[in-house]
Amino acid sequence: MRNTPSKPFLKWAGGKTQLLEELEKRIPEELKDGKLPVFIEPFVGGGAVFFHFNNIFNFDKCHIFDINEEIILAYTVVRDDVDSLISQLDDLSSEFLSSNDIARKEFYYQVRDEFNHSKADVNFSRFGALWTERAAQLIFLNRTCFNGLFRVNTQGEFNVPFGRYKKPKILNADLLRADSDTLQNTEIHHGDFISAGSFVSERTFVYFDPPYRPLNQTSSFTGYSKNGFCDSEQRRLARFFADCNAAGAKLMLSNSDPKNIDYDDDFFDTLYSDYKIERVPAKRMINCDATKRGEISEIIVTNF
């Protein structure tokens, strides 16, 4: 075992760290017995489940996907160029932490503007020197912005305001190296969740963590990509879930529970009526009012 276990290097709205124990309780027996050597996550996001499961199970191969090209770029840099990333993050961290509050805010918006304006110069389909610089900027912004959000506007520009943390942990070199090590058995893919289909077989365990269906208008957070994720996308995902089931894979999916707000809302109970649906406790983390971050239930769907 490594001294520093791998875990998300980004703060992530809706991350699954708090659900890991509940998810691990429900893993299929075939995974425990080493009969599912391939792990697939079609919505990797912050990667809490990926890092956790890849730490404790001896997968031959992992495939992680995300529609957000910035996230895919960051994962690739952590896997393939972690030492340069650490060096560039160290420079950003040192300048930020050595500044007073006013200068910190100015520096944050300077980095955010550069991050947004330089996007047109980045070839997201081919690794290059700009990738490492951009990954360092992304991690810096994520660690110093308001609430550690990743949110973009309709133009795909990062638009989260400054966070005013006293001592943000911008650089964690040990964690980045541990994550790089964990990623060595992993293929990283930019694309819609449907792209994962060609890797699905009876030898795979697939975990789905789509953007959660909002419980109400104020709780909606699907801004990690400029396209959002509406009910028609949730239905399209359910059809893909059925395709993966037909291919013989073992499947697990988490999502919000509409019954927290409306007991008669059977949206997911209907979509996944052919599978096992369980409700588990979770804490509402995405709310600007801390008094409204109470315990709710979420659903876990499995085909085993």
Image (cartoon, grey):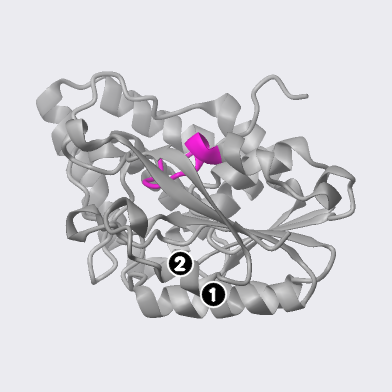
Rendering coords of residue 119 (x, y %): 34, 64
Q: Is the residue 143 above or below the residue 157 in the image? A: above
Q: CA distance from mark 2 to mark 1?
A: 9 Å
Q: Magenta stretch containing residue 250, yes or no?
A: no
In this rendering, would 75 be left or right of 245?
A: left
Residue at label 2? 268
Q: Of callouts 2 and 1, which one flags the residue occurring earlier in the amino acid sequence? A: 1
Q: Quadrant of the C terminus?
A: bottom right
Residue situated in front as seen by the camera: 199 or 209:
209
Rendering coords of residue 152 (x, y %): 27, 60
Residue type at tag 2: Phe
- Residue 96 picture quarter: top left
Rendering coords of residue 66 (x, y %): 52, 64
**What segment is highlighted magenta in the picture?**
8-19
Q: Residue furthest left?
A: 102
Our reading of the magenta stretch's main secondary structure is loop
Classify mark 1: residues with Cα within 10 Å, few (<14), some (14-19) or many (20+).
Answer: some
Circle 1 SS class: helix
Find residue 127 and name its label: none
Residue at label 1? 238
Residue type at tag 1: Ala
Residue situated in front as seen by the camera: 135 or 276:
276
Residue 151 visible at all: yes
Circle 2 SS class: helix
Residue situated in front as seen by the camera: 167 or 94:
167
